[in-house]
Image (spheres, rainbow, N blue to C red):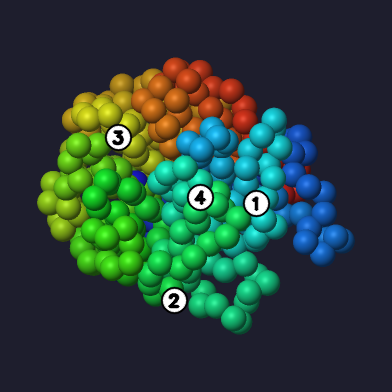
Amino acid sequence: MTRIPRRRPRALILLAAAGLLLAACSATDTTAETGRDGAAPDPGTGHLHGLGVDPADGAVYAAGHHGVFRLDGGTATRVADRYQDTMGFTVTGPATFLASGHPDPAESGTRPAHLGLIQSTDAGRTWQTLSAEGEADFHALENAGEVLYGFDSQSERVWASTDGGPKWAKRADVAALDLASHPDSATTVWAATGTGLSRSDDGARTFRPVPSSPGLVAVEEPEPGRLLALTADGRVVASRDGRTWTEKGRLPAGGEGRVLTAVTSQRLLASDSGDVVYESVDGGRTWVLLHRPAIGSDHS
């Protein structure tokens, strides 16, 4: 983090879900005032695709339309002055990140439009291509122990790798905004679809819709049998079976949900449609502000 009709209907559904995630941003300047050329305004993070904590030093990172950012004291600092559109951002170990997306505009014409699977082992300062460059654009990546899952927006399928990413098997055709996996069973995979939740028990080869699930934009399973998810209207909800859900809290200021990362079952990171980043240490009941984008930042 799956049913949905094909091609054009699916595209319309995903567009509608994405539309729920777009909104104007609010105040407080927390990014640099000038861009790479020293003259144009810095575009800020752009809309955010992923959040995570580096276990090497506990730092919070946000991946967005204009790079990977380290969040500290309300300030978002772009790592290594890289402006690549970083999708599917996932922290897999100390200083080790996986991602996908699109090249830094400075590399336009020298690299394919889709980065495939990329990895950093120095907290985002440099990246190496692992696979699928020019082919895959992974909007979601889920590290499930011995299996890595990715939702590729180009093929609209979940891919699975058993060697950490160099080789992939293309599996179910599913409209996924986010993926989650069972901590003790890599064959159990959840897909948040914007309109509901789907489950696979065969390693993402097939998915079936979960009845009565709310419209989820993000899903996590931080401990066995406990699902945490974020709805498009900013509610944090919990479930044991994916069918019956309990509201645990809500993002502040009525924010529409976009990204949810469960560092633990109690420590959560989330961002809303204004790309404001929040942290909760009580499972989503209360939230504190980590980052608010500058007025006029690009959230396209």
Residue holding disc 3: 221
Question: Is residue 263 at all visible to an observer of this figure?
Answer: yes
- Disc 4 to disc 1, how far (Cα)? 16 Å
- Disc 4 to disc 3, how far (Cα)? 19 Å
Query: Residues at badges 4 and 3 in contact (C-beta under 8 Å)?
Result: no
Residue lying at the far right in this picture: please name it: 39
- Label 3 crowding class (10 Å Cα cut-off): few <14, some 14-19, many 20+? many
Residue holding disc 4: 49
Query: Residues at badges 4 and 1 in contact (C-beta under 8 Å)?
Result: no
Q: Is the residue 161 above or below the residue 185 in the image?
A: below
Q: What element carries label 1?
A: helix
Residue 263: percent from the left, percent from the top?
42, 32
Residue holding disc 1: 79
1 or 3: mark nearer the eye:
1
- Label 1 crowding class (10 Å Cα cut-off): few <14, some 14-19, many 20+? some
Q: Which amino acid does label 1 sit on?
A: Val
Q: Is the residue 245 above or below the residue 297 in the image?
A: above
Residue located 34% across and 37% down the image: 220
Q: Earlier along the polypeptide chain: callout 2 or callout 3? A: 2
Does residue 231 appear to the left or right of 69 in the view shown?
A: left
1 or 2: mark nearer the eye:
1
Question: Is residue 64 at all visible to an observer of this figure?
Answer: no
